[in-house]
Structure formats: C-alpha cells, structure tokens
Image: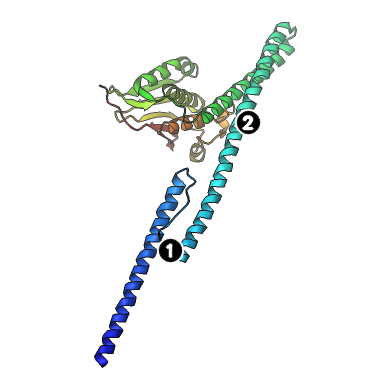
C-alpha cells in the first residue's frame, strides 16, 4: 500500500513538472514571438500590431502594452516626418524668396557704383557689394542644401568611373587652388574604380571637399584614390583641433577660420555620400586634416 502511494506521488510530481515545463516552453515561445514581432515592427513602416499564439493572459496583456507603445511611436514618427518636411519646405521657400531681392540689390549696387562721384562713396559701395555678394552666396548654398535634403531618394544611380570624375573635379578647381597658392599632390590608382553612384552627386561631393581644402588648408593638399576605392583628401590645418574636426559634418557648424561659410559644405557632402550608401569620416593627427570616403559594391567592367 505504501508503495502504491509513493508511486502515485512520484507520478503526480512528474505530471506537474511536465505541465510546468510545457507552460515555461509556451511562455518562452510567446516572449520570443513578441521580441521578433516588436523588432520587425520597428524596422518596417507598417500598421500591423503584435499578435502571439499564446493564450496566457499575462503574455497577452504584455503584448497589448507593447502594441500601445507601437501606436505611440508611430504617431510620434508621423509627427516628426510631417514637421521635418514642413521645415525643409520652409527653408527651401525662404532661401528661394531671398534670392530675388538679393539679386536686385546687387544689380542696383552696380548701377550706383557707376554713378558714384567720390572716393568715399565708391569705398562704401564696395563694402556693401562685398557683403551683399557674401550673403547671396550663403543663401544660394542654403537653397542647394534644402533641395538636396528634400530630394533624398531621387538619385540617378549608374556605373560611374570614380577616377574620371575625380580628375575632372580637380581640373575644374585648378585656378582656384592656384589663386590660394595650393599645389595639390595627386596619387590616383591606374585601376578603374567603378561604383554604382549618381554622377552629379559625386561631382558635388568632390567640389565641396575641394572648397573645404581651400578654406582650411595651410598651403598643401594631398588627394589619393587607392585600388580599394578609398578616396582621401588631406591637408595641414594648424588652426583646427579634434573637437572642431569632430563637428565638421554638423549642419551650420563653422570654425573661426571659415567666417564666410554657412557650415553646409561638408554636411551636404555627408548627406550625398550616405544617400549613395557610402561612408565619410574626418580625422585629425599631427595638425593634419584627412577626410576619407568609401563607396560599396565595386562593379567589374565587361
């Protein structure tokens, strides 16, 4: 009789352990389903909520809480995208509206300069023209930046020979570099570096980097393109420090040596590089500023 009760007790214990094991397994499965579903909903733009196979009330309550957080996140994302688009449109419209009166001001200053009769008036007009021209350039740069940001995703991607675009960009800047007594040292690989890019965007990136070199260089400039496709612009820049270099890609950030800049040149370059799935970085060692660009997916010529 004692043995029967003992075996019954053991059997009941094993049954309870089995039920608990099944329960734990189901709870773990539900938790895994919720984790995977939550990660998926965060990565994709969908209105689908989290659903689990478990009937456990605690797990379903947790799923409901997560669904509530997802709804709130989507609402905040919608408000952010709407506000971001309104801001981009506002900046574009403001920059566009400023261009017309600035053009008129510059035109009237030219006329006034022709009518000026004294040396003092000519000097004052010259100062006004210089300031108006500077403001016009900054407004134009702001307008271009707003257009580039608003046109994200509209790039015309095609196989591009990076060597050729880089050579053309350097040649186009030859006179500007010469005016600033900068003779670039150029090292380009003979291998054909082909990437799937937007050619006009790549040209704009190189133009902005060359402009940056003109602003910050202490008289030298090294440009290289390696066989791996790495593009590096490097120059001595004693007036910078690591903190400033770390913020060079920030929108509207300028350093003291570049008062005539909006701080958008490198930010535009970064935006364009990232739109084409590339990477851009800046480093500062031994008073030397280096900006490095890499684009993925090398394409073989047929």
SS category of the residue bearing label 1: loop
Q: Are marks 1 and 2 in contact (CB under 8 Å)?
A: no
Q: Is residue 4 left or right of residue 42?
A: left
- In the rendered image, which quarter is residue 9 located in? bottom left
Q: Position of residue 131 (x, y in %)?
A: 66, 21
Compared to residue 173, the image places residue 116 above or below, namely: above
- Secondary element under disc 2, as helix, strand or loop, is helix
For residue 115, above or below residue 39: above
Which residue is at the front of the view, 193 or 225? Answer: 193
Q: Is residue 105 left or right of residue 86?
A: right
Is residue 156 at all visible to an observer of this figure? Answer: yes
Disc number for residue 55: 1
Q: Which residue is mark 2?
A: 90
As drawn, the label of residue 112 is: none
Residue occupying image coordinates x 47% and y 65%: 57
Label 2 Cα neighbours within 10 Å, binned few <14 / some 14-19 / many ≥20: few
Q: Nearer the viewer, mark 1 or mark 2?
A: 1
- Tell me if mark 1 has few (under 14), some (14-19) or many (20+) residues whose alpha carbon lies within 10 angstroms of its own: few
**Quarter of the picture holding the N terminus:** bottom left
In front here: 228 or 237? 228
Q: Nearer the viewer, residue 205 or 36?
A: 36
Task: Tell me which numbered mark, 1 or 2, is placed earlier along the sequence.
Answer: 1
- 211 left or right, relative to 85: left
Residue 214, percent from left and from top: 49, 24
Quadrant containing the C terminus in the rendered view? top left
**Residue furthest out toward the bottom:** 1
Image coords of residue 240 (percent x, y): 50, 35
- Measure the C-alpha gap from mark 1 to mark 2: 50 Å
Spot occupied by residue 228 in the image (x, y as percentages of width and height): 30, 31
- At x 42%, y 16%, the residue is 171
Can residue 126 be seen here? The reply is no
């Amino acid at each position: 009789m004692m043995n029967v009760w003992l075996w019954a007790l053991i059997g009941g214990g094993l049954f309870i352990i089995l039920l608990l094991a099944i329960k734990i397994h189901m709870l773990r499965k539900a938790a895994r389903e919720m984790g995977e579903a939550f990660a998926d909903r965060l990565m994709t733009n969908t209105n689908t909520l989290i659903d689990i196979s478990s009937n456990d009330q605690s797990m379903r309550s947790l799923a409901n809480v997560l669904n509530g957080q997802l709804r709130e996140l989507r609402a905040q994302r919608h408000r952010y995208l709407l506000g971001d688009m309104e801001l981009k449109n506002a900046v574009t419209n403001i920059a566009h509206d400023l261009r017309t009166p600035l053009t008129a001001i510059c035109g009237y200053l030219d006329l006034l300069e022709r009518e000026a009769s004294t040396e003092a008036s000519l000097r004052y007009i010259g100062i006004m023209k210089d300031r108006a021209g500077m403001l016009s350039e900054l407004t134009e740069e702001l307008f271009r930046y707003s257009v580039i940001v608003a046109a994200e995703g509209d790039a015309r991607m095609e196989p591009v020979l990076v060597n050729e675009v880089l050579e053309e960009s350097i040649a186009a800047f030859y006179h500007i570099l010469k005016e600033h007594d900068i003779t670039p040292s150029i090292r380009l690989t003979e291998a054909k570096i082909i990437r799937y890019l937007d050619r006009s965007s790549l040209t704009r990136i190189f133009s902005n980097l060359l402009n940056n070199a003109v602003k910050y260089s202490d008289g030298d400039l090294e440009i290289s393109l390696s066989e791996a496709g790495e593009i590096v612009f490097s120059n001595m820049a004693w007036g910078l420090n690591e903190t400033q270099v770390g913020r060079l890609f920030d929108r509207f950030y300028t350093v003291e040596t570049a008062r005539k800049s909006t701080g958008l040149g490198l930010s535009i370059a970064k935006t364009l590089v990232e739109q084409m799935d590339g990477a851009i970085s800046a480093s500062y060692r031994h008073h030397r500023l280096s900006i490095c660009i890499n684009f993925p997916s090398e394409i073989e010529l047929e």
